[in-house]
Image (tube, rainbow, N blue to C red):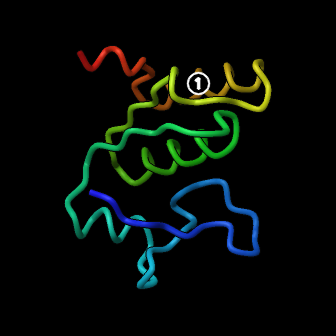
C-alpha cells in the first residue's frame, strides 16, 4: 500500500501521524480505513521522526517494527536511547535481514 502523506508543511512535525493524505484524512484514519495493523518504521532521524512516528503508531494500537539497519540518527547516544525507549514501549527492534 502506498499513500502519499504530507507533513511539516510550514510547521514542525516529527511524527507521520501529524500528517494528512492528499484528500485531508489523518494518517490514523487512513490506516483504520485500510485495516492496517502492522507498521514498519524506517528513515531519518532515529532520535526524532522515527521515534515520534513509532511511538504514535503504538499509541494508535499498531504492531510496530523498527529496522535498525534502515534508520539513521542525528546523534548516536540519543539514537540508542530512542531505540531503547521504543523497545520498552513495545516496538520490535530488528534488522531487515531478519525477514529472511
Residue 85 image-quadrant placement: top right
Vertical arrangement, residue 15 with respect to residue 28, above or below: above
Vertical arrangement, residue 11 with respect to residue 76, above or below: below
**Which residue is found at the position 51% from the left and 61% from the top?**
17
Query: Regarding mark 1 in the picture, which secondary structure is present there?
Result: helix
**Which residue is found at the position 41% from the left and 79% from the top?**
25
> Could you tell me residue 93's position as x and y percent?
45, 22
> Could you tell me residue 67's position as x and y percent?
45, 26
Vertical arrangement, residue 93 with respect to residue 14, above or below: above
Residue 43 image-quadrant placement: top right
Residue 8 image-quadrant placement: bottom right
Front position in the image: 76 or 81: 76
**Which residue is found at the position 50% from the left and 42% from the top?**
54
Front position in the image: 72 or 52: 72
**Which residue is found at the position 44% from the left and 49% from the top?**
57
Vertical arrangement, residue 23 with respect to residue 47, above or below: below
> Could you tell me residue 22's position as x and y percent?
45, 80
> Could you tell me residue 41's position as x and y percent?
46, 39
Task: Name the residue beneath numbered marker 1.
Answer: 83
Q: Is residue 34 left or right of residue 19?
A: left
Q: Within 10 Å of the Cα at label 1, are there few (<14), some (14-19), or many (20+) other Cα atoms?
A: many
Q: Quadrant of the N terminus?
A: bottom left
Q: Quadrant of the C terminus?
A: top left
Front position in the image: 72 or 49: 72
Give the number of callouts.
1
Q: Is residue 44 left or right of residue 70?
A: right
Task: Please identify the residue farthest to the left as the structure is shown.
Answer: 35
Amino acid at each position: 500500500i502506498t499513500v502519499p502523506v504530507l507533513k511539516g508543511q510550514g510547521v514542525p512535525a516529527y511524527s507521520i501521524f501529524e500528517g494528512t493524505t492528499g484528500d485531508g484524512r489523518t494518517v490514523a484514519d487512513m490506516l483504520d480505513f485500510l485495516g492496517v495493523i502492522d507498521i514498519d518504521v524506517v528513515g531519518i532521524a532515529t532520535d526524532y521522526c522515527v521515534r515520534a512516528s513509532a511511538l504514535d503508531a503504538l499509541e494508535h494500537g499498531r504492531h510496530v517494527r523498527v529496522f535498525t539497519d534502515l534508520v539513521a540518527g542525528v546523534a548516536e547516544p540519543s539514537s540508542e536511547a530512542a531505540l531503547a525507549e521504543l523497545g520498552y514501549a513495545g516496538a520490535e527492534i530488528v534488522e531487515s535481514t531478519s525477514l529472511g
